[in-house]
Image (cartoon, rainbow, N blue to C red):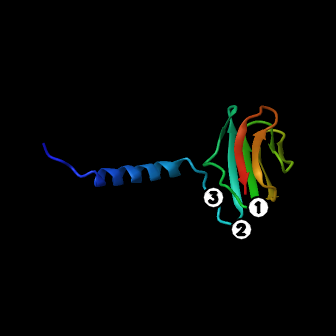
Amino acid sequence: MAHRPAAPLAAALLTAAAVLAGCGSTPAAPPGEPVTLTAELSDGGVTVPEEAPEVTRGTEVTLQVTSDAAAEVHVHGFDEYIRLDGPGSGEVTFTADIPGVFEIETHDTGLLIYRLAVR
């Protein structure tokens, strides 16, 4: 029976673990660069292109929302709103200057759009 060295297997397992560990992390926005988040509200659901990146305090964040119906979107913690009286789009820009994790959701249906982490 042939004996195979364990080192190549161990190296492969460590590489796979490192790759998988990175998959669950939230991307970080480069410090000081503005961030734009987009969302589409349609048929009672939400579509976003990606997770909200973790931002540093003082980052300018723009939220752009398009909806197929009337909607009110609230950025918790910053008391920013986008109100749409019918189908259309709107945006709001604010400075993320409070550390924490903040939900961005529709007020009328409580649909979670993003969780914004500010560090």
Q: How many marks?
A: 3
The answer to whether mark 3 and mark 2 are in CB contact below 8 A is no
Residue 63 percent location from the top left of the image: 75, 52
Distance from disc 1 to disc 3, alpha carbons, whole Å, reads 12 Å
Left or right, 9 with reference to 110: left
Image quadrant in which you'd find residue 15: bottom left
Q: Quadrant of the N terminus?
A: top left
Q: Which of the two discs, 1 and 3, labels the residue nearer the N terminus?
A: 3
Q: Position of residue 21 (x, y in %)?
A: 50, 49
* Residue in the picture at 80% in, 37% down: 70
Query: Residue 28: which numbered mark, if any?
Result: 3
Which amino acid does the dot numbered 2 rest on? Gly
Secondary structure under the numbered disc 2 in the rendered image: loop
Percent of width and height locating residue 64? 73, 51
Q: Quadrant of residue 71?
A: top right
Mark nearer the N terminus (1 vs 2) = 2
Badge 1 density bin: few <14, some 14–19, many ≥20, Cα 10 Å: some
Label 3 element class: loop
Residue 32 spot, x, y in % from top left: 71, 68
- Which label number is shown at residue 32? 2
Q: Residue at x 72, y 45 (%)?
A: 66
How would you rate the neighbour count of disc 2 (Cα within 10 Å): few for under 14, some for 14-19, many for 20 or more?
A: few
Which residue bears the numbered disc 1?
57
Q: Secondary structure at mark 1?
A: loop
